[in-house]
Amino acid sequence: MRAIIEYFSTHGAEYLQMVGEHLGVSALTLVIAAVIAVPLGVLCARSPLIDRISVGIATVLRIIPSLAILIFLVPILGTGVLPAVVALCILAVPPILINTALAFSTLPAEVLEAAVGMGMSPARVFFKVKVPLAFPAAFAGIRTAAVEVIASATLASYIGAGGLGEIIFTGMGLMRTDLLCIGGASVAILSLAVGQLLSVVDRRMRRYERA
Amino acid sequence: MAPLNEYLDYWASHADDFGEALLEHFALVGMVLLWSLALAAVLTLAVMRSRRAEHISVQLLSAVYSIPSLALFSLLIPVTGLGATTAVLVMVAYNQYLLLRNVLEGLDGIDPDIVEAAVGMGMSPWQVLYRVKLPLAAPMILAGIRLAAISTIGIATIAATINAGGLGTILFSGLRTMNQYKIVGGTLLCALVAVVADRLLKLVERVIVKRTVH
């Protein structure tokens, strides 16, 4: 316990920097992954061919162990933040893509027909009807991806991306119980907090459902 | 990157290293799955009488499941030390979420009329569970087992960081020595094992479901 307090008093700034790196890499990854996966998911609902190909690839990617994806890129891209973000994107795109595609292809047909019948333009149908209806399922994909990215970003420390994984790997290397506890607890809290935060966002965005 | 034949030469000359890691991986995954199934069966029997208990246990397990494996490993090392024991404990805990969620969803999704008919025919609670509920919930249960197996195959690679052996050993030693033959071979093998396991389990699922439903 004393060792833990001592760590924070001497390495406080370093610790905060690692938390920052961890969140930075994760946020960057999620934004890039969402920019790729959400439009692709919307396209999937329009074209069965694109759906078959991209959901097929995403399903296989989802099965492959995350560590294998992280490490596979090292001979090609080297170590550092870039290969980590690319690898984490490969992990984050499939859940977002699969959920968005499913959300947009299972919209109730009679609601869409009613919207068209009311004289809405295709753009209005998309933004006023399709997007709000598809949001919960699509957002669930983003939430899954976020929790997975926070977890895998810990592993990404091993390929030089910084973040809280560094504390854990140092602790394992030196067998320092204090570092293991600090690193383990920090990552656990971070991932639980992000999961909770996103479910609050989800509930906020769906408030209209209760109206 | 080196030409393909250099990769093939390296893999051929180190085939026994890859084979050994693969066997270790299978042993680790097999042990985790056996313990997971046994514990999940006990937990299911313990909570299935009350919806409240079901809900609370699945919520708790989902919180555990969302904690990254490296974090759980490092929190357990001070207690159980480096090695396969810690890895097995963590993976069994994760699998409880995947298994319980699917098993309970499968059991609770059964039409109450069917259960009532079985009771009315004079079946004992055990007979109802064993001869009516389990076959009807089989698709969900088998899907849960497949998810648990795939997740275990993935997390078992990470378990190499705490000396639990397996395919992760090849990945980490390849990374330390920057040996691209090892890195590419190891990652491809990991991916292959996961994909093949998924296909095989889906096949088994289809066969069993066909037999139990008809």
Image: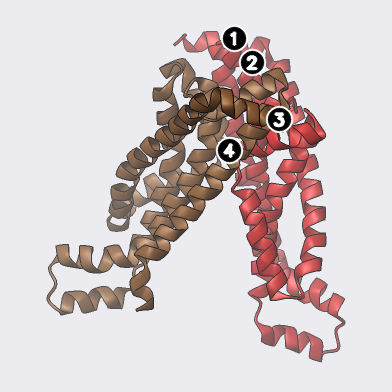
Chain colours: A brown, B red
The residue indicated by pointer 4 is A186
Q: Name the amino acid, label 4.
A: Ser
| Local secondary structure at mark 1 | loop
Crowd around label 2: few <14 · some 14–19 · many ≥20 (10 Å): some
Q: Chain of mark 3?
A: A
Q: Is residue B173 visible?
A: yes
The verdict on a common chain for dots 2 and 3 is no
Q: Tell whether label 4 touches label 3 (CB within 8 Å).
A: no
| Location of residue B132 in the rendering, given as x and y in whole percent from the top left corner | 76, 76
Look at the picture and state if A113 lies above or below B17: below
Assess disc 4: are there few (<14), some (14-19) or many (≥20) residues with their C-alpha within 10 Å of its C-alpha.
some
| A195 or A57: nearer the viewer | A195
If you read the primary sequence from the N terminus, does the residue marked by circle 3 or circle 4 appear first? 3
In this rendering, which labeled residue sits more in front, label 4 or label 1?
4
Verify CB contact (< 8 Å) between mark 2 and mark 1.
yes
Q: CA distance from mark 2 to mark 3?
A: 35 Å
User: x%, y% of residue A160?
Assistant: 49, 20
Q: Is label 4 on the same chain as label 1? A: no
Type of amino acid at the residue the image marks with label 2: Ser
- Name the residue: 44% across, 20% down: A80
Q: Chain of mark 4?
A: A
Q: Quote the CA–CA distance across marks 4 and 1.
A: 30 Å
- Which residue was labeled with disc 1? B177
